[in-house]
Structures are given as C-alpha cells and as structure tokens.
Image: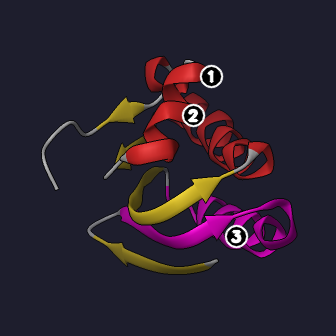
Amino acid sequence: MEYGINESGGVVTVALTGNLYVESVAKLREDCLKYIEQGKINFVFDMHKLEYIDSSGLGVLITVQKRVRPRGGNVTIRGLKGIVRELFELTRLDKVFDIERNAG
C-alpha cells in the first residue's frame, strides 16, 4: 500500500493506493495523528486507487473520525468503488462517514 498526504486550506487529503492491510496501517495512523496534533481536523480519504481495505485500515479511519469530530472536524471518503464500497456498505460505515457520491 502506498499513500500520499497533502494539506491545503486546512484540509488534509490522504490518497490511498493498492491494498490497505494490517501490516501497513501503523505508519498511516501515526502520520494522520500528527496532523491532528497540529490542529488539522478536516480529512479527505481519496480511495479512487484503493483496491482493498481490511478491518485495521477501517480502524484507522474510525480513529481519525473519533479524534476530529469532538473538535468540530470531519472525515470525508472520496472515490469508493468495487469491494471497498461493498465493505463500507456491509459494515455500515457508509452511514458513519461523509461519502462523496460523485462519479470518478
């Protein structure tokens, strides 16, 4: 799994690529929490190029959500497709996060 993080205008965008498994989430979690410690509370996770996410990957998203919501922040999920979309629907996380529904 690869990811890139870009902060612009107070929004932290995390672009995920490949497969997000337990082996690769520790660094991602650490990097996201650093932004939160710096006062960044609005995150967009871009999943256009994400092929799979396991429960530990979903846990990172939930961790970020739990940290930013009390501070008035938000987590938006962009580019859900295929099995990743199905996992969000099966776990009902599509009701927990703001999901961008536009095509892409």
Q: Is residue 28 left or right of 101 when viewed as pictured?
A: right
Between the C-alphas of marks 1 and 3, the distance is 21 Å
Q: In the rendered structure, are the residues bearing label 1 and label 2 in contact, judged by CB atoms less than 8 Å apart?
A: yes
Q: Which residues are magenta?
A: 11-40
Residue 15, quarter of the rendered image? bottom left
Q: Amino acid at mark 2?
A: Leu
Residue 9, image quadrant = bottom left
Of residues 21 and 97, the one drawn nearer to the viewer in this rendering: 21
Residue at the left extreme? 103
Judged from the image, the secondary structure of the residue bearing numbered disc 2 is helix
Q: In which quadrant of the rendered view does residue 20 lie?
A: bottom right
User: Which mark is on residue 28?
Assistant: 3
Image quarter where the C terminus lies is bottom left
Residue wearing tag 2:
87
Asked if 17 appears above or below 85 in the picture, the reply is below
| Residue 37 within the segment the image draws in magenta | yes
Q: Nearer the viewer, residue 69 or 24?
A: 24
In the figure, 40 relative to 58: above or below?
below
The amino acid at mark 3 is Leu
